[in-house]
Image (cartoon, rainbow, N blue to C red):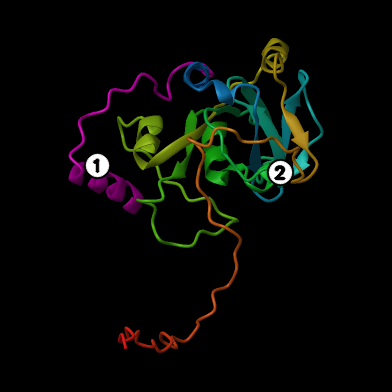
Amino acid sequence: MTLVILGLFVASTQAQPPVHYFHNANLPPGTVAYGQLQRHMLMREYYQPVEVAVPKGARVSVNVGGQFDDPHEATVLVGMQIGPVYQLKISNIPYYEGFEIFPTIEVINRLYPPEGKAGRFPIPIQFTQEELELALSGRYVTRVVYLEDRDTALPVQDDPAQQRYFEAGPGQDPLQVADTLGRPMLIMRMGSRVPSPDDLAIGAHGAPAIVYESSAVPAIGSTDAKNAIERPGYNIPRVEVPNIGRPPQIPFVVPQSP
């Protein structure tokens, strides 16, 4: 809730005109991503690493080539392009071991990591036990993962094992709320619907997901420096150096003519 208040405060103090959005999270899956491709050609065919995490004990599988691969425990690193809608299967859910959930992920933006280090900077999406139980009860869950604006981000240290989130209020669109707080990166949708074989075939058409065995993602150079995200350098500890002052200055004396 504090994060929402901060975003609204910044928007009101800057007195910006209202933004008219062409997209919202309720559009058919894939609509927002394909709209992004129309505006940013350099996003085409780029595989953005996405780190998917599920609760302890659960398993996650990825639709690869029209069928789900072998279940992965805890986390899996997946390469996804902007445009297609990718399908997951979450099974062995704690307290609901006999049930399965089939979320979809729509990547709508990309990161610009240092060359050769894309696997170290994935977009994280962590499924919570509460979200899975809501989907099992027949509720429809939408989550938008966004990259915080460095000028308005809270100065707190995050726990890598727990993704911070908040719920959009009644009548609020999560995509638009995320846009006021930073840069929306992906949309996750999850309900009680079970995909048919035709759904799996369509989801694998064109740009199937790539499951990486580790963080060693193939290097893809980032040439769009204008839209690149600035990142700090290596984490080198600072050393306090005492101020020794400036060296003494020798005055310059103009020589007298004889």
Mark 1 burial class by Cα count in 10 Å: few <14, some 14-19, many 20+: some
Mark sitting on residue 34: none
Residue 2 magenta: yes
Give the foreground label among 2 and 1. Answer: 2
Position of 93 with respect to 172 (left or right) is right
Location of residue 247 with respect to 88 vertically, above or below: below
Location of residue 237 with respect to 123 vertically, above or below: below
**Residue kind at label 1, given as amino acid type:** Ala
Image quadrant holding the C terminus, namely: bottom left
Mark 2 burial class by Cα count in 10 Å: few <14, some 14-19, many 20+: some
Q: Position of residue 111 (x, y in %)?
A: 56, 38
Q: Position of residue 194 (x, y in %)?
A: 64, 21
**Residue kind at label 2, given as amino acid type:** Gly
User: What residue lies at 59% left-to-right and 64% top-to-bottom?
Assistant: 235
Residue holding disc 2: 116
79, 251: nearer the viewer:
251
User: What residue lies at 73% left-to-right and 25% top-to-bottom?
Assistant: 63
Q: Can you see residue 241?
A: yes
Q: Give the range drawn in magenta.
A: 1-30
Of callouts 2 and 1, the N-terminal one? 1
Residue holding disc 1: 11
